[in-house]
Image: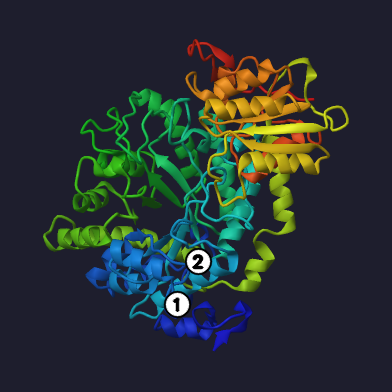
Amino acid sequence: MPDSSTGSTGNTARPSRRAVLAATAGVTTALAAGGTVHAATGPSAPDDRRLRALISRMTLEEKVGQLFVMRVYGHSATDPDQADIDANLKEIGVRTAAELLAKYRVGGIIYFAWAHNTRAPHQIADLSNGIQEASLALERGLPVLVSTDQEHGIVARVGEPATLFPGAMAIGAGGSRADARTLGRIAGSELRALGIRQNYSPVADVNVNPANPVIGVRSLGSDPRSVAELVVAEVKGYESSRIASTAKHFPGHGDTVDDSHAKLPYIHHTREQWEQLDAPPFRAAIAAGIDSIMTAHIVVPALDDSEDPATLSRPILTGILREELGYDGVVVTDSLGMEGVRTKYGDARVAVLALKAGVDQLLNPPHLDVAWNAVLNAVRDGELTEARLDESILRVLRLKAKLGLFQNPYVTHAGVDRTVGTRSHLATADRIAERTTTLLVNEGGLLPLSPRSRPKLLVVGADPASPSGTTGPPTGVLAGALTELGFTATALSTGTAPSSATIAEAVAAARDADAVVVGTYNVTAANSQKTLVEQLLATGTPVVAVAIRNPYDVAHLPGVAAYVASYSWTDVELRAAARVIAGKADPRGTLPVPVQRADDPATVLYPVGHGLTY
């Protein structure tokens, strides 16, 4: 009988405990009962002997499937929208998540907002339950490890009404290990309530290159020791909620000028520089018991002179990560659809080479049939041994056992309602955001603004697509928050590259305002955002700037009297910036990265630790 706590029927209903046991054909009972308890793997985890017995009963095809973590379109495991069925047929050759599991026996599924997996909390829970039910109904069916990228800040797949926290660089600006741990604990509890058990966070990359196009504010900062401490704190928070966290992107993606989504970046650190700059957060994460580590599609010649991407490098993944650093947890690739890993070898070879390098989970290949069959044929042809597959499957099953998936992989609507986006969670995120907001410049004590002396505000600036499922656009969120604080604030979107006509409109509006708040986004010397701000300053109306992504913007706009860094344009960070501007919260963040002069990058304009207060 279905458990009525889900509040619905069919695919959305959660089978009872008896049904779970029946669906696993005795596997759950065999694993859960009488197993030796190991503190390192959690109180409910069975011992390796029982897991190895489970592996021994798998077919080769089932073993291959366990190594893959795959995307699938749709809000439901069995009844997605027609457009999602069409996308699945085109990209994967199946109609639904249930068919994906039946055909390929994949060990994991990754959720994306763009794949329509994460529309609403109850829907996500129902999708997770449907996936587990479909997998466990198969002969020798196993629970599925559902994962996602919930970094917070500019990368998150589960949006509101779930709790969204400031991103990594903001957490670095706050510098609080307690806040980082709280983030992991609350975010982990909400993911678990939705049936998501593996989170691809925290980012352990040390961002030492301001021009880094792919990491940037996704990094906790530029100081390896500080990054390591905050990574450990976040890992401990996730662990307390029984969520598998993932340190990424090994061996370190923090010093590149190329985006591995589009090409294969090179990092030219010496071995000594790698040890000093890139390795510390990963070493610390391993010492803290990190459950999984994600690889980077980057070339580090000092670590492997073959110039293979790290994802495919045995010297890096086995030689350094496994043998030198002593890591024996799950290694997952970054997405195999990224160009960085596809540049040198074809998609079929990538999957095989990743396993030979030491990977356990193959994430999101562009063509699952190609990659799946390549691994299967590599075993049949003797290039890979079945024992090598067993080694990785054991790590994956250990993790599933540790997370309680063999005991009960299901979630309930009641659990969602108790946990996801609660008032206390949202209030905690707001308080943390206030502690991360950084005041870089405040000439003449322009801030805080008062609605009594400057009641009429104009909010202009960049309006990039809202990240993380938040409301946006940034100008609207800022204007709305300032209006709630007693101002009369009007939003005027000027974009990331304002035209002359747009700039003229903003300048005209500024002359009728008591102050202007302008959101800047990745300003460069040649960007017309710089022209916009300069012309706003020429009106004589006071200008307050908010760097809504990289704090480096301040170097290009020396004439601005007051500059705030929010590190992202999510609602929680923008609302905190508004409270700081209005004096309802004191700025407490400090720069976790240095800001160099725009005209002399060798000279530091604002060092790590810089931050003003009231």
Q: What's the residue type where badge 2 is placed? A: Val
For residue 209, which quarter of the picture?
top left
- Residue 248, horizontal then vertical, whole percent: 44, 43
Residue that protrudes farthest toward the right in the picture:
452
Q: Is residue 384 above or below residue 476?
A: below
Q: Which residue is mark 2?
A: 37
Quadrant in which the N terminus is drawn: bottom right
Kindly state the secondary structure of the residue where label 1 is placed. helix
- Residue 477, horizontal then vertical, whole percent: 67, 43
Counting the numbered discs, the total is: 2
**Residue 145: image tag:** none
Quadrant in which the C terminus is drawn: top right
Asked whether 446 or 299 is in front, the reply is 446
Which label's residue is closer to the chain start, 2 or 1? 2
Kindly state the secondary structure of the residue where label 2 is placed. loop
Q: Are marks 2 and 1 in contact (CB under 8 Å)?
A: no
Residue at image point 27% right, 60% down:
368
- Residue 563, horizontal then vertical, whole percent: 67, 24
Residue at image point 35% right, 38% down:
260
For residue 3, which quarter of the picture?
bottom right
Whole-number angstrom distance, CA of label 2 to CA of label 1: 27 Å
Q: Which residue is mark 1?
A: 133
Asked whether 232 or 148 is in front, the reply is 148
